[in-house]
Amino acid sequence: MRHFGSESELRDREAIALSRVQPELFRVVFERHYDTVWRYLRIRLGASSADDLASETFMRAFAARARYEPRFDSALPWLFGIAGNLIAADRRREARRLRAYARAGLLEQRESVEDDWIGRLAARSQGRALVVALAELRSEDRETLLLSAIGGLTHPEVAEAMGVAEGTIGARLSRARTKLAPALAGLVEHEAAAHG
Amino acid sequence: MDETTVLAELLVAGVELEPSETARRRSVGQLDALVEAARRQGGLRYPDRSRRRTRVPLRVLAAVVVALGACTAAWAAAGRPDLHLFASGPTHPTPIRIQNDFAGAKGSLSVDLGSVAPIGSFATQHGKVTVYAARTRAGGGFAALYATGESHVVARMAYLPSPRDAAHADRRLVVSSNSLNGMFDGVWQIWGTTPRAVARLELRYADGTTSRVPLHKRLFVFLADGERCKPGHEPVTLSAIAATGGIVDRANVRISRC
Protein backbone atom coordinates (compact mmCIF):
# COMPACT_ATOMS: atom_id res chain seq x y z
CA MET A 1 0.00 0.00 0.00
CA ARG A 2 1.21 3.48 -0.81
CA HIS A 3 0.56 6.50 1.35
CA PHE A 4 0.37 9.73 -0.53
CA GLY A 5 1.02 13.03 1.07
CA SER A 6 -1.20 16.00 0.44
CA GLU A 7 0.88 18.05 -2.00
CA SER A 8 -1.06 17.25 -5.14
CA GLU A 9 -4.27 17.94 -3.26
CA LEU A 10 -3.26 21.40 -2.13
CA ARG A 11 -4.98 24.34 -3.68
CA ASP A 12 -2.74 27.01 -5.10
CA ARG A 13 -3.34 29.40 -2.25
CA GLU A 14 -2.56 26.69 0.29
CA ALA A 15 0.60 25.62 -1.52
CA ILE A 16 1.80 29.22 -1.79
CA ALA A 17 0.99 29.96 1.84
CA LEU A 18 2.78 26.82 3.01
CA SER A 19 5.73 27.50 0.70
CA ARG A 20 6.63 30.44 2.91
CA VAL A 21 7.88 27.95 5.45
CA GLN A 22 8.27 24.92 3.19
CA PRO A 23 9.68 26.48 0.00
CA GLU A 24 9.65 23.19 -1.90
CA LEU A 25 5.84 23.25 -1.92
CA PHE A 26 6.01 26.01 -4.52
CA ARG A 27 6.79 23.21 -6.96
CA VAL A 28 3.08 22.32 -6.79
CA VAL A 29 2.24 25.69 -8.34
CA PHE A 30 5.01 25.33 -10.89
CA GLU A 31 3.93 21.86 -12.00
CA ARG A 32 0.31 22.94 -12.20
CA HIS A 33 0.72 26.13 -14.19
CA TYR A 34 4.05 26.14 -16.01
CA ASP A 35 2.59 24.83 -19.26
CA THR A 36 -0.24 27.38 -19.27
CA VAL A 37 2.06 30.33 -18.57
CA TRP A 38 4.55 29.08 -21.15
CA ARG A 39 1.76 28.70 -23.72
CA TYR A 40 0.58 32.27 -23.16
CA LEU A 41 4.08 33.63 -23.49
CA ARG A 42 4.73 31.38 -26.48
CA ILE A 43 1.80 32.81 -28.38
CA ARG A 44 2.64 36.37 -27.41
CA LEU A 45 6.38 36.38 -27.87
CA GLY A 46 7.60 33.21 -29.56
CA ALA A 47 9.16 30.01 -28.28
CA SER A 48 12.60 31.20 -27.23
CA SER A 49 11.27 34.18 -25.29
CA ALA A 50 8.63 31.94 -23.73
CA ASP A 51 11.30 29.59 -22.39
CA ASP A 52 13.11 32.45 -20.68
CA LEU A 53 10.14 34.45 -19.49
CA ALA A 54 8.15 31.48 -18.18
CA SER A 55 11.10 30.59 -16.02
CA GLU A 56 11.50 34.21 -14.93
CA THR A 57 7.78 34.42 -14.14
CA PHE A 58 7.99 31.56 -11.65
CA MET A 59 11.19 32.81 -10.10
CA ARG A 60 9.61 36.22 -9.52
CA ALA A 61 6.47 34.57 -8.21
CA PHE A 62 8.52 32.51 -5.80
CA ALA A 63 10.36 35.59 -4.58
CA ALA A 64 7.05 37.42 -4.11
CA ARG A 65 5.12 34.53 -2.56
CA ALA A 66 4.99 36.22 0.86
CA ARG A 67 2.89 39.02 -0.63
CA TYR A 68 0.51 36.77 -2.51
CA GLU A 69 -3.07 37.71 -1.67
CA PRO A 70 -5.37 35.06 -3.10
CA ARG A 71 -8.70 36.09 -4.50
CA PHE A 72 -9.20 32.95 -6.55
CA ASP A 73 -8.55 29.25 -6.09
CA SER A 74 -6.15 29.40 -9.01
CA ALA A 75 -2.88 31.34 -8.90
CA LEU A 76 -3.01 31.80 -12.67
CA PRO A 77 -4.26 35.42 -12.60
CA TRP A 78 -1.37 36.30 -10.31
CA LEU A 79 1.12 34.47 -12.53
CA PHE A 80 -0.29 36.09 -15.66
CA GLY A 81 0.07 39.44 -13.91
CA ILE A 82 3.76 38.77 -13.38
CA ALA A 83 4.14 37.51 -16.92
CA GLY A 84 2.35 40.63 -18.12
CA ASN A 85 4.90 42.82 -16.40
CA LEU A 86 7.64 40.93 -18.17
CA ILE A 87 5.85 41.30 -21.46
CA ALA A 88 5.47 45.01 -20.83
CA ALA A 89 9.19 45.37 -21.28
CA ASP A 90 8.71 43.88 -24.69
CA ARG A 91 5.55 45.82 -25.43
CA ARG A 92 7.08 48.85 -27.04
CA ARG A 93 9.04 46.62 -29.35
CA GLU A 94 5.82 44.72 -30.11
CA ALA A 95 3.95 47.95 -30.84
CA ARG A 96 6.72 49.17 -33.14
CA ARG A 97 6.59 45.89 -34.98
CA LEU A 98 2.82 46.13 -35.32
CA ARG A 99 3.08 49.60 -36.79
CA ALA A 100 5.77 48.41 -39.15
CA TYR A 101 3.56 45.58 -40.34
CA ALA A 102 0.67 47.91 -40.75
CA ARG A 103 2.74 50.24 -42.92
CA ALA A 104 5.03 48.11 -44.95
CA GLY A 105 5.49 44.94 -46.94
CA LEU A 106 4.88 41.98 -44.73
CA LEU A 107 6.52 39.12 -46.52
CA GLU A 108 10.00 40.60 -46.31
CA GLN A 109 9.77 40.72 -42.55
CA ARG A 110 8.05 37.44 -41.94
CA GLU A 111 11.11 35.35 -41.36
CA SER A 112 12.34 37.28 -38.38
CA VAL A 113 9.04 37.12 -36.56
CA GLU A 114 7.71 33.93 -37.97
CA ASP A 115 7.04 32.36 -34.63
CA ASP A 116 5.04 35.06 -32.92
CA TRP A 117 1.40 35.95 -33.18
CA ILE A 118 1.91 39.15 -35.13
CA GLY A 119 3.83 37.36 -37.82
CA ARG A 120 1.36 34.52 -37.96
CA LEU A 121 -1.61 36.80 -38.30
CA ALA A 122 0.07 39.03 -40.81
CA ALA A 123 1.02 36.05 -42.92
CA ARG A 124 -2.63 35.14 -43.45
CA SER A 125 -4.55 36.50 -46.35
CA GLN A 126 -6.66 39.33 -45.00
CA GLY A 127 -4.67 39.07 -41.79
CA ARG A 128 -3.10 42.45 -42.28
CA ALA A 129 -6.38 44.24 -41.59
CA LEU A 130 -6.56 42.44 -38.28
CA VAL A 131 -2.98 43.35 -37.43
CA VAL A 132 -3.75 46.96 -38.25
CA ALA A 133 -6.82 46.85 -36.03
CA LEU A 134 -4.80 45.31 -33.20
CA ALA A 135 -2.10 47.90 -33.65
CA GLU A 136 -4.64 50.66 -33.31
CA LEU A 137 -5.97 49.30 -30.02
CA ARG A 138 -4.78 50.97 -26.87
CA SER A 139 -2.09 48.81 -25.33
CA GLU A 140 -4.16 48.09 -22.22
CA ASP A 141 -7.13 47.06 -24.38
CA ARG A 142 -4.88 44.74 -26.38
CA GLU A 143 -3.42 43.22 -23.23
CA THR A 144 -6.90 42.67 -21.81
CA LEU A 145 -8.11 41.04 -24.99
CA LEU A 146 -5.12 38.72 -25.23
CA LEU A 147 -5.35 37.68 -21.59
CA SER A 148 -8.95 36.78 -22.20
CA ALA A 149 -8.43 35.14 -25.60
CA ILE A 150 -5.16 33.31 -25.06
CA GLY A 151 -5.04 33.02 -21.30
CA GLY A 152 -8.67 31.98 -21.02
CA LEU A 153 -9.15 34.09 -17.91
CA THR A 154 -12.55 35.27 -16.75
CA HIS A 155 -13.24 38.99 -16.36
CA PRO A 156 -12.51 38.99 -12.61
CA GLU A 157 -9.30 37.04 -13.21
CA VAL A 158 -8.15 39.42 -15.94
CA ALA A 159 -8.89 42.28 -13.57
CA GLU A 160 -6.73 40.59 -10.93
CA ALA A 161 -3.92 39.97 -13.42
CA MET A 162 -3.93 43.60 -14.58
CA GLY A 163 -4.60 45.16 -11.21
CA VAL A 164 -7.70 47.08 -12.29
CA ALA A 165 -11.40 47.03 -11.45
CA GLU A 166 -13.58 44.34 -12.97
CA GLY A 167 -15.81 46.91 -14.64
CA THR A 168 -12.80 48.31 -16.46
CA ILE A 169 -12.15 44.92 -18.04
CA GLY A 170 -15.67 44.74 -19.44
CA ALA A 171 -15.30 48.20 -20.95
CA ARG A 172 -11.91 47.40 -22.44
CA LEU A 173 -13.06 44.13 -23.97
CA SER A 174 -16.14 45.76 -25.39
CA ARG A 175 -14.04 48.52 -26.94
CA ALA A 176 -11.53 46.04 -28.35
CA ARG A 177 -14.19 43.76 -29.78
CA THR A 178 -15.94 46.63 -31.46
CA LYS A 179 -12.76 47.73 -33.16
CA LEU A 180 -11.72 44.23 -34.18
CA ALA A 181 -15.09 42.98 -35.35
CA PRO A 182 -14.89 44.19 -38.98
CA ALA A 183 -11.37 42.85 -39.50
CA LEU A 184 -12.19 39.52 -37.87
CA ALA A 185 -15.37 39.15 -39.86
CA GLY A 186 -13.46 39.83 -43.08
CA LEU A 187 -10.81 37.27 -42.18
CA VAL A 188 -13.33 34.60 -41.24
CA GLU A 189 -15.33 35.19 -44.42
CA HIS A 190 -12.22 35.05 -46.55
CA GLU A 191 -11.05 31.78 -44.99
CA ALA A 192 -14.49 30.25 -45.24
CA ALA A 193 -14.55 31.11 -48.95
CA ALA A 194 -11.02 29.80 -49.44
CA HIS A 195 -11.94 26.47 -47.87
CA GLY A 196 -15.07 26.15 -49.92
CA MET B 1 -18.57 32.48 -31.69
CA ASP B 2 -17.58 35.88 -30.36
CA GLU B 3 -14.57 37.90 -31.42
CA THR B 4 -12.46 36.70 -28.52
CA THR B 5 -12.97 33.05 -29.43
CA VAL B 6 -12.24 33.66 -33.10
CA LEU B 7 -9.11 35.58 -32.22
CA ALA B 8 -7.97 32.82 -29.85
CA GLU B 9 -8.35 30.23 -32.58
CA LEU B 10 -6.42 32.37 -35.04
CA LEU B 11 -3.62 32.93 -32.56
CA VAL B 12 -3.07 29.30 -31.65
CA ALA B 13 -3.47 27.90 -35.15
CA GLY B 14 -0.38 25.96 -36.17
CA VAL B 15 1.57 26.74 -33.01
CA GLU B 16 3.45 24.20 -30.94
CA LEU B 17 1.80 24.63 -27.56
CA GLU B 18 3.91 22.40 -25.36
CA PRO B 19 7.19 23.56 -23.86
CA SER B 20 10.24 21.48 -24.66
CA GLU B 21 11.61 19.15 -22.03
CA THR B 22 14.87 21.09 -22.14
CA ALA B 23 13.11 24.35 -21.31
CA ARG B 24 11.11 22.73 -18.58
CA ARG B 25 14.16 21.11 -17.01
CA ARG B 26 16.03 24.41 -17.09
CA SER B 27 13.13 26.19 -15.41
CA VAL B 28 12.81 23.46 -12.79
CA GLY B 29 16.53 23.71 -12.13
CA GLN B 30 16.41 27.48 -11.69
CA LEU B 31 13.41 27.26 -9.39
CA ASP B 32 14.96 24.44 -7.38
CA ALA B 33 18.07 26.55 -6.85
CA LEU B 34 15.90 29.32 -5.38
CA VAL B 35 13.95 26.82 -3.30
CA GLU B 36 17.13 25.34 -1.92
CA ALA B 37 18.50 28.80 -1.10
CA ALA B 38 15.23 29.69 0.62
CA ARG B 39 15.24 26.47 2.59
CA ARG B 40 18.78 27.07 3.79
CA GLN B 41 17.77 30.54 4.88
CA GLY B 42 14.63 29.35 6.65
CA GLY B 43 11.62 29.77 4.39
CA LEU B 44 10.17 33.23 4.79
CA ARG B 45 13.51 34.79 5.46
CA TYR B 46 14.23 34.46 1.77
CA PRO B 47 14.66 38.07 0.62
CA ASP B 48 11.88 39.57 -1.43
CA ARG B 49 13.98 41.90 -3.49
CA SER B 50 11.19 43.61 -5.37
CA ARG B 51 9.53 45.35 -2.38
CA ARG B 52 10.57 47.45 0.54
CA ARG B 53 11.12 44.86 3.19
CA THR B 54 10.19 47.00 6.17
CA ARG B 55 6.52 46.81 5.25
CA VAL B 56 6.29 43.08 4.79
CA PRO B 57 6.19 41.98 8.45
CA LEU B 58 3.39 44.41 9.28
CA ARG B 59 1.36 43.30 6.30
CA VAL B 60 1.94 39.65 7.05
CA LEU B 61 0.93 40.17 10.68
CA ALA B 62 -2.17 42.07 9.65
CA ALA B 63 -3.10 39.34 7.17
CA VAL B 64 -2.62 36.65 9.81
CA VAL B 65 -4.79 38.51 12.31
CA VAL B 66 -7.54 39.06 9.75
CA ALA B 67 -7.35 35.45 8.53
CA LEU B 68 -7.48 34.04 12.06
CA GLY B 69 -10.46 36.23 12.89
CA ALA B 70 -12.28 35.19 9.73
CA CYS B 71 -11.55 31.50 10.34
CA THR B 72 -12.70 31.65 13.94
CA ALA B 73 -15.91 33.39 12.99
CA ALA B 74 -16.57 31.02 10.12
CA TRP B 75 -15.93 27.90 12.15
CA ALA B 76 -17.99 29.20 15.02
CA ALA B 77 -20.85 29.87 12.64
CA ALA B 78 -20.64 26.51 10.90
CA GLY B 79 -19.83 24.25 13.82
CA ARG B 80 -16.98 21.78 13.58
CA PRO B 81 -15.12 22.08 10.31
CA ASP B 82 -15.59 18.39 9.45
CA LEU B 83 -19.38 18.75 9.77
CA HIS B 84 -19.68 15.27 11.32
CA LEU B 85 -19.71 13.74 7.90
CA PHE B 86 -19.10 10.17 8.98
CA ALA B 87 -21.03 7.77 11.08
CA SER B 88 -19.70 4.90 13.17
CA GLY B 89 -21.35 1.96 14.88
CA PRO B 90 -21.91 -1.76 14.84
CA THR B 91 -23.41 -1.76 11.35
CA HIS B 92 -20.31 -0.24 9.87
CA PRO B 93 -19.99 -1.78 6.40
CA THR B 94 -16.25 -1.17 5.89
CA PRO B 95 -14.23 -4.41 5.48
CA ILE B 96 -11.69 -5.05 8.17
CA ARG B 97 -8.79 -5.05 5.66
CA ILE B 98 -9.70 -1.49 4.70
CA GLN B 99 -9.75 -0.51 8.36
CA ASN B 100 -6.34 -2.11 8.72
CA ASP B 101 -4.97 -0.18 5.76
CA PHE B 102 -6.24 3.06 7.21
CA ALA B 103 -4.78 2.07 10.55
CA GLY B 104 -1.35 1.80 8.91
CA ALA B 105 -1.41 5.43 7.85
CA LYS B 106 0.78 7.65 9.98
CA GLY B 107 1.31 11.34 10.56
CA SER B 108 -1.15 13.63 8.84
CA LEU B 109 -2.91 10.59 7.41
CA SER B 110 -3.66 9.09 10.79
CA VAL B 111 -7.42 8.68 10.91
CA ASP B 112 -10.26 8.11 13.35
CA LEU B 113 -11.03 4.48 12.51
CA GLY B 114 -14.57 4.79 13.78
CA SER B 115 -15.29 7.24 11.02
CA VAL B 116 -14.27 5.06 8.04
CA ALA B 117 -17.06 4.89 5.48
CA PRO B 118 -17.43 3.72 1.86
CA ILE B 119 -18.19 6.56 -0.52
CA GLY B 120 -18.65 4.86 -3.88
CA SER B 121 -17.25 2.53 -6.54
CA PHE B 122 -16.16 3.66 -9.97
CA ALA B 123 -15.23 1.87 -13.19
CA THR B 124 -11.91 3.20 -14.47
CA GLN B 125 -9.26 2.08 -16.91
CA HIS B 126 -7.44 0.66 -13.89
CA GLY B 127 -10.46 -1.49 -12.99
CA LYS B 128 -12.99 -0.85 -10.29
CA VAL B 129 -11.85 1.68 -7.72
CA THR B 130 -13.76 1.91 -4.46
CA VAL B 131 -13.30 5.05 -2.41
CA TYR B 132 -13.43 5.06 1.36
CA ALA B 133 -13.04 8.12 3.53
CA ALA B 134 -12.31 8.84 7.16
CA ARG B 135 -11.66 11.84 9.39
CA THR B 136 -8.04 12.55 10.15
CA ARG B 137 -7.15 12.67 13.82
CA ALA B 138 -5.60 16.09 13.48
CA GLY B 139 -6.13 19.11 11.33
CA GLY B 140 -9.85 18.79 10.66
CA GLY B 141 -9.24 17.11 7.33
CA PHE B 142 -10.10 13.72 5.99
CA ALA B 143 -8.27 10.93 4.23
CA ALA B 144 -9.43 8.90 1.31
CA LEU B 145 -8.53 5.30 0.56
CA TYR B 146 -8.75 4.16 -3.05
CA ALA B 147 -9.12 0.40 -3.15
CA THR B 148 -8.66 -1.70 -6.28
CA GLY B 149 -8.59 -5.47 -6.55
CA GLU B 150 -4.96 -5.71 -5.61
CA SER B 151 -3.71 -2.50 -4.06
CA HIS B 152 -4.87 0.28 -1.83
CA VAL B 153 -3.76 3.87 -1.82
CA VAL B 154 -4.36 6.34 0.99
CA ALA B 155 -4.23 10.07 0.32
CA ARG B 156 -5.02 13.06 2.45
CA MET B 157 -7.57 15.45 1.00
CA ALA B 158 -7.06 18.51 3.15
CA TYR B 159 -9.77 20.45 4.95
CA LEU B 160 -13.32 19.80 4.00
CA PRO B 161 -14.74 22.30 3.93
CA SER B 162 -11.83 24.68 4.04
CA PRO B 163 -11.98 27.42 6.67
CA ARG B 164 -12.91 29.83 3.90
CA ASP B 165 -15.86 27.68 2.79
CA ALA B 166 -17.03 26.69 6.26
CA ALA B 167 -19.27 29.72 6.73
CA HIS B 168 -21.49 28.88 3.76
CA ALA B 169 -21.03 25.09 3.64
CA ASP B 170 -24.54 24.53 5.00
CA ARG B 171 -26.07 26.42 2.13
CA ARG B 172 -23.70 25.96 -0.81
CA LEU B 173 -21.98 23.19 -2.71
CA VAL B 174 -18.29 23.12 -1.87
CA VAL B 175 -16.48 21.49 -4.79
CA SER B 176 -12.84 20.62 -5.44
CA SER B 177 -11.37 18.68 -8.32
CA ASN B 178 -8.00 17.22 -9.13
CA SER B 179 -6.22 14.64 -11.20
CA LEU B 180 -5.19 11.36 -9.60
CA ASN B 181 -2.14 11.04 -11.85
CA GLY B 182 0.60 9.29 -9.98
CA MET B 183 -1.91 7.06 -8.27
CA PHE B 184 -4.24 6.22 -11.16
CA ASP B 185 -2.99 7.90 -14.32
CA GLY B 186 -5.71 9.44 -16.43
CA VAL B 187 -8.27 9.40 -13.63
CA TRP B 188 -9.66 12.59 -12.14
CA GLN B 189 -11.96 13.18 -9.24
CA ILE B 190 -14.31 15.78 -7.95
CA TRP B 191 -15.13 15.87 -4.29
CA GLY B 192 -16.67 18.12 -1.72
CA THR B 193 -19.67 18.67 0.52
CA THR B 194 -23.29 19.48 -0.16
CA PRO B 195 -25.75 21.84 1.50
CA ARG B 196 -28.16 20.33 3.98
CA ALA B 197 -31.35 18.75 2.63
CA VAL B 198 -29.86 17.40 -0.57
CA ALA B 199 -31.25 14.11 -1.89
CA ARG B 200 -28.96 13.58 -4.87
CA LEU B 201 -26.16 15.07 -6.91
CA GLU B 202 -26.09 15.26 -10.66
CA LEU B 203 -22.97 15.93 -12.73
CA ARG B 204 -23.65 17.39 -16.17
CA TYR B 205 -21.13 17.11 -19.02
CA ALA B 206 -20.52 19.44 -21.94
CA ASP B 207 -22.16 16.92 -24.30
CA GLY B 208 -25.43 17.09 -22.34
CA THR B 209 -25.13 13.71 -20.62
CA THR B 210 -25.26 13.35 -16.85
CA SER B 211 -23.96 11.10 -14.08
CA ARG B 212 -25.37 10.46 -10.66
CA VAL B 213 -22.73 11.26 -8.06
CA PRO B 214 -22.68 8.97 -4.99
CA LEU B 215 -23.40 10.84 -1.81
CA HIS B 216 -22.51 9.79 1.71
CA LYS B 217 -24.33 12.02 4.13
CA ARG B 218 -23.03 15.36 2.91
CA LEU B 219 -19.76 14.14 1.46
CA PHE B 220 -19.25 13.15 -2.17
CA VAL B 221 -16.36 11.84 -4.24
CA PHE B 222 -16.64 11.00 -7.93
CA LEU B 223 -14.01 9.36 -10.15
CA ALA B 224 -13.95 9.17 -13.95
CA ASP B 225 -11.48 8.86 -16.80
CA GLY B 226 -11.24 8.26 -20.56
CA GLU B 227 -13.95 9.91 -22.60
CA ARG B 228 -14.73 12.34 -19.85
CA CYS B 229 -11.36 14.01 -20.31
CA LYS B 230 -11.95 14.91 -23.93
CA PRO B 231 -12.99 18.43 -24.91
CA GLY B 232 -16.71 18.58 -25.48
CA HIS B 233 -17.35 15.76 -23.03
CA GLU B 234 -15.83 17.22 -19.89
CA PRO B 235 -17.94 17.88 -16.76
CA VAL B 236 -19.30 21.40 -16.54
CA THR B 237 -21.75 21.69 -13.67
CA LEU B 238 -22.70 19.86 -10.51
CA SER B 239 -26.27 20.25 -9.24
CA ALA B 240 -27.46 19.54 -5.72
CA ILE B 241 -31.09 18.40 -5.93
CA ALA B 242 -33.59 18.23 -3.09
CA ALA B 243 -36.07 15.38 -2.53
CA THR B 244 -38.74 17.55 -4.12
CA GLY B 245 -36.71 17.76 -7.32
CA GLY B 246 -35.79 21.39 -6.88
CA ILE B 247 -32.19 22.49 -7.35
CA VAL B 248 -30.68 23.59 -4.05
CA ASP B 249 -27.38 24.80 -5.49
CA ARG B 250 -25.30 24.46 -8.60
CA ALA B 251 -21.55 24.80 -9.05
CA ASN B 252 -19.28 24.95 -12.06
CA VAL B 253 -16.77 22.12 -12.33
CA ARG B 254 -13.35 22.39 -13.91
CA ILE B 255 -11.20 19.31 -14.01
CA SER B 256 -7.46 19.38 -14.32
CA ARG B 257 -5.59 17.61 -17.09
CA CYS B 258 -6.01 13.83 -17.00
Image (tube, coloured by chain):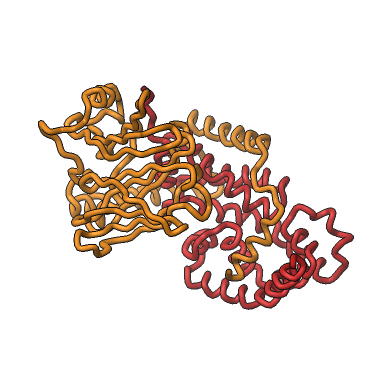
Specify whether residue A66 is in view. Answer: yes
What chain is colored red?
Answer: A
Image position, residue B124 (x, y; %): 42, 37
| Residue at the image point whose x is 48% and y is 31% from the top | B39
| Residue at the image point whose x is 52% and y is 49% from the top | B230
Compared to residue B250, the image places residue B43 above or below, namely above
Image position, residue B138 (x, y; %): 24, 34
The part of the image, by quadrant, that contains residue A105 is: bottom right
Image position, residue A109 (x, y; %): 86, 59
Please give left or right for residue A195 compared with residue A172 in the image.
Answer: right
| Residue at the image point whose x is 36% and y is 34% from the top | B129
From the viewer's side, name the closer residue of A74 and B38. A74
Specify whether residue A70 is in view. Answer: no
Please give left or right for residue B24 compared with residue B162 in the image.
Answer: right
From the viewer's side, name the closer residue of B160 and B133. B133
For the C terminus of chain A, give its image quadrant: bottom right
